[in-house]
Image (cartoon, grey):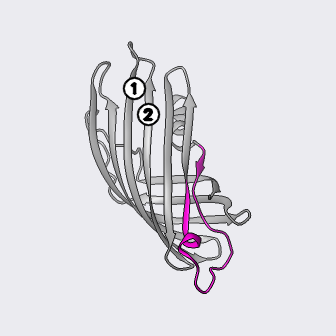
Amino acid sequence: MKKVFLLFIFFGSLTAYGQWGAEELDQKPSIKDRIFTGGGFGLSFSSNFDFFSLSPLIGYRVTQRFAAGTSITYRRTTYKFVNPKISTNDWGLSPFVRYQVRGPLFLHAEYEYLNLQYLMSQAQLERRSFSSFMAGAGIFQPIGRRAGFFAIALYNFSYRNPTSAADYYPYNSPWVLRAGVTAGF
C-alpha cells in the first residue's frame, strides 16, 4: 500500500501541459499563435509525507506538426516519519521536442536534468544531480481549442538500476508513464 501511495505522490498528481488541438495554423501565424504554455501541479498529504510540485512549461510550434519547448520543475517533500521533520527541495529543467505523427499520435523526446535532495538516514540529507534522455510516444485527444487529454510512455535511455542502498536514482524503472488533462493558456 505504501508503494502505491508513493507512486501516486510522484506520478498521480494533476498535470496540465499546454497543447494544441486539431486547428490548423494560418499561412503566416503570429509568434503569439505559435507559443503555448501550460505546466503541472501536484499536491499530496499523508501521515508520512507532504508533497508539493510545480512545473511550468513553455513551447513554440515550429511547424504545424513539430514543437519544441522546456519546462522547469520545483518539488518540496516533507518527511514526517523522522523527528524532527525534514524537508527536501528539488529542481529541474526539461527541454523537449514533439512531433505529431498522425491524428492524435505524437513522438516525444526530452532531456531531463534533476537536482535532487534526498534522505539518506534519519538525519542526513544528500544532494545529487541526474541527467536523463527520454523518448517515446503518446496520444493527445483535444477537448476544445486549448484543452485535451494526453497519455505518454517514455523510455529513459539513461536509466541505471541501483546496486546498493547508497546508490540512489530518481526512477524505479526505465519506463516513465504520464497521463492527464491538459489546459493551455
Tell me which segment is drawn in magenta.
Answer: 14-38
Query: 80 above or below 71?
Result: above
Is residue 75 toward the left or the right of residue 167 in the image?
right
Which residue does the image show at 50% across and 43% down from the upper left? 54
Q: Which SS does the magenta portion mostly show?
A: loop
Q: Position of residue 51 (x, y in %)?
A: 50, 32
Q: Residues within 10 Å of mark 1 (few under 14, many from 20)?
A: some
Q: Are marks 1 and 2 in contact (CB under 8 Å)?
A: yes
Considering depth in this image, is 9 or 183 the residue closer to the camera? 183
Give the alpha-carbon distance from disc 1 to disc 2, as whole Å: 7 Å
Which residue is at 58% across, 42% downward?
12
Residue 167 figure quarter: top left
Q: Where residue 108 appears, x then y in whole percent?
A: 48, 67
Q: Amino acid at mark 1?
A: Ser
Tag 2's secondary structure? strand
Instruction: Identify residue type, mark 2.
Output: Arg
| Residue at the bottom extreme of this rendering | 27
Residue 129 within the magenta-colored segment of the rendering = no
The disc placed on residue 76 is 2
Residue wearing tag 1 = 87
